[in-house]
Image: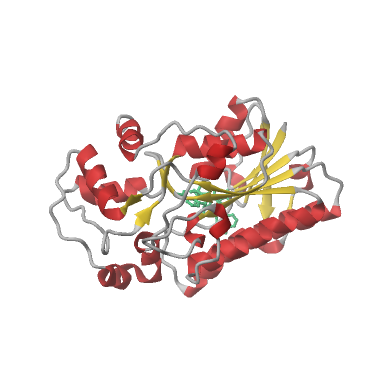
């Protein structure tokens, strides 16, 4: 099968491409930066410029499935200009693909988009299934709403749409974990805010497996990309420090301090989303890492 991946040069994209190749798929990918193109056996890179709506037409030739992972990182200070980039990078890129497919002949059957659990309304008591997406009024909620709306539009082209609402991805290679580990390794780790907010984590191997599973099984609709047992920030931090054999003695960092230091972006660590993975499990997906302890042990043993 031939697959096109956007955001293929990023943390998750690189791992996804490696897994797709390992299972025998051919991969096209698009990048905004021509110097990142490195063609290898079974992989071809192309340039696109979503802000200008342009994409090399060959990128879509013979493609059966598109994975849409491109998007400016949310882990950078949210100035008004950067907030526009976070939103535009996801929406304009989807629109560029949509228009290219609308214009030409294509054989794309499935569009699989990254999304995020940050779209669910922050709550320390609710447990959310995919049907509970009412959209968080926060900036991240607005991004998720626009991102998923852009994905859903592909249905108008007769293409099946799948949205993976990704949680806190655990890996030694990227994402939030190495950033969370740094203060703990220095003996300066602390719980954020009340510590009662839920983090719905997933081991990166399970997430990449899940991305492949929805393609191989042609599963459409929204799926939460989270592991079995979301943990509160307090429990998550305590387990992480324990697994790192580091003390956790500082008092919690109050939410207002985080908001002063990080601005609106503090929402990333202060908001609470306790999200269920029942739907993907009922579809037959088996998780390799069922507890935070097991996931962290596997990751820390590679460090
Ligand atoms: N990692 C997580 O924990 C997590 C959690 C929830 C959701 N997600 C979502 O999953 C997707 C992949 O995450 P990731 O961690 O792999 O992200 P990443 O490492 O930051 O990579 C994102 C990719 O998007 C492309 N990109 C960046 N800015 C862009 C722009 N302005 N216009 C077009 N493309 C741009 C880049 O590709 P080029 O430079 O090659 O163009 C980059 O390789 C993202 O949409 C992210 O929001 C991730």
- Which residue is located at x 42 percent, y 57 percent? 273
User: Is residue 16 visible in the rendered structure shown here?
Assistant: yes
**Horizontal and vertical percent position of residue 8:** 58, 43
Regarding residue 54, the answer to whether it shows in the image is no
Front residue of 19/152: it is 152
Left or right of 302: which side holds 67?
Answer: right
Looking at the image, residue 88 lies above or below residue 129: below
Q: How is the image coloured?
A: secondary structure
- Residue 144, quarter of the rendered image: bottom right
Classify residue 149 as left or right of residue 106: left
Q: Residue at x 81, y 53 (%)?
A: 157
How many dots with numbers? 0
Pick whichever, 152 or 281, lies toward us.
Answer: 281
In percent of width and height, residue 78 lies at: 44, 68
The residue sitting at 75% across, 38% down in the picture is: 64
Residue 287, percent from left and from top? 47, 34
Residue 282 drawn at (x, y percent)? 56, 38
């Amino acid at each position: 099968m031939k697959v096109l991946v956007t955001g293929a040069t990023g943390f998750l994209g690189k791992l996804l491409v490696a897994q797709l190749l390992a299972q025998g798929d051919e991969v096209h990918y698009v990048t905004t930066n021509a110097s990142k193109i490195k063609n290898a056996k079974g992989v071809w890179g192309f340039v696109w410029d979503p802000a200008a709506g342009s994409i090399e037409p060959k990128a879509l030739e013979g493609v059966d499935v598109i994975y849409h992972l491109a998007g400016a990182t949310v882990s950078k200070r949210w100035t008004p200009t950067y907030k526009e980039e976070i939103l535009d990078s996801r929406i304009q890129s989807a629109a560029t693909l949509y228009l290219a497919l609308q214009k030409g002949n294509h054989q794309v059957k499935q569009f699989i988009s990254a999304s995020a659990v940050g779209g669910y309304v922050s709550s320390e008591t609710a447990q959310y299934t995919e049907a509970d997406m009412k959209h968080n009024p926060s900036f991240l909620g607005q991004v998720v709403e626009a991102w998923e709306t852009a994905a859903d539009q592909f249905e108008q082209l007769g293409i099946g749409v799948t949205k993976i609402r990704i949680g806190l991805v655990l890996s030694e290679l990227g994402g939030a974990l190495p950033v969370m580990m740094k203060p703990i390794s220095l003996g300066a780790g602390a719980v954020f805010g009340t510590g009662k907010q839920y983090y719905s984590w997933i081991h990166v191997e399970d997430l990449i497996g899940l991305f492949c599973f929805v393609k191989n099984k042609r599963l459409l609709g929204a799926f939460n990309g989270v592991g079995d047992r979301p943990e509160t920030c307090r429990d998550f931090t305590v387990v992480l420090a324990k697994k790192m054999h580091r003390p956790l003695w500082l008092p919690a960092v109050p939410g207002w301090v985080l908001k002063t230091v990080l601005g609106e972006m503090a929402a990333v660590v202060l908001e609470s989303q306790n999200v269920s993975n029942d739907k993907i499990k009922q579809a037959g997906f088996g998780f390799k890492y069922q507890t935070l302890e097991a996931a962290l042990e596997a990751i820390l043993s590679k460090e």
